[in-house]
Amino acid sequence: MTLEYTAVVDSSVLLGYKDGHEGCQDLLYKAIDRDIEIIISPLTISKIWSSPDFDRKSEIGYLGLLEFISIYSCDTNIAINTGHYLREYSNDIKLDLEMASIVSICDISGYPLVTTNPELYQGILERAIDCEEALKQLN
């Protein structure tokens, strides 16, 4: 089976799915149906699990969703590249560890990033699009 589309997503897409964001839900439903491959950073999982409103119900829901998502391995190249981005953009207060890891994964894999807020990655990553744009590319 050849997948139609592969993309990296950040925590905003998973949180959007939980919060009822239609674009996020439609994108992740395609991953659940195995029409597309969604990749996340291990740090995306950490960011979600560290959220103040995270509870047992959230844990059960996200664990179920993770069955349909690929976790990108954090090898030496990813770790070095993540550190490079953190150092290079250290003056940019919005760049956190998850974002630096995602930029590194996209850089090394060549896959685009899907996020609810592409503007956050402006000037750091060229190929950041929102869920609606990703869904248009599938049609």
Image (cartoon, grey):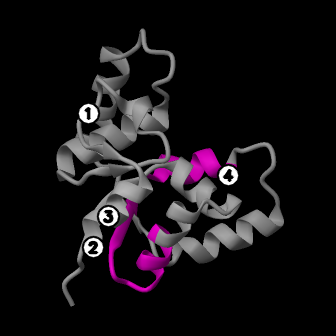
Magenta region, main secondary structure: helix
Who is closer to the viewer here, 16 or 53? 16
Q: Which mark is residue 49?
A: 4
Task: Report the Cα–Cα distance between label 3 and label 4.
Answer: 30 Å
Q: Secondary structure at mark 3?
A: helix
Q: Residue furthest bottom?
A: 1
Who is closer to the viewer here, 84 or 117? 117
Mark 3 neighbour density, 10 Å: few (under 14) some (14–19) many (20 or more): few
Q: Name the side, left or right, on which 90 lies relative to 103.
A: right
Mark 1 neighbour density, 10 Å: few (under 14) some (14–19) many (20 or more): some
CB contact under 8 Å: marks 3 and 2: yes
Label 3 is placed on what type of residue?
A: Lys
When the figure is inspected, residue 57 is found, relative to residue 35, above or below; the finding is above
Q: How many marks?
A: 4
Task: Report the Cα–Cα distance between label 3 and label 2.
Answer: 5 Å
The magenta span reads 27-49
Q: Position of residue 117 (x, y in %)?
A: 48, 40
CB contact under 8 Å: marks 2 and 4: no
- Dot placed on the residue nearer the N-terminal end, 2 or 4: 4
What residue is shown with label 1? 81
Q: Position of residue 55 (x, y in %)?
A: 82, 59
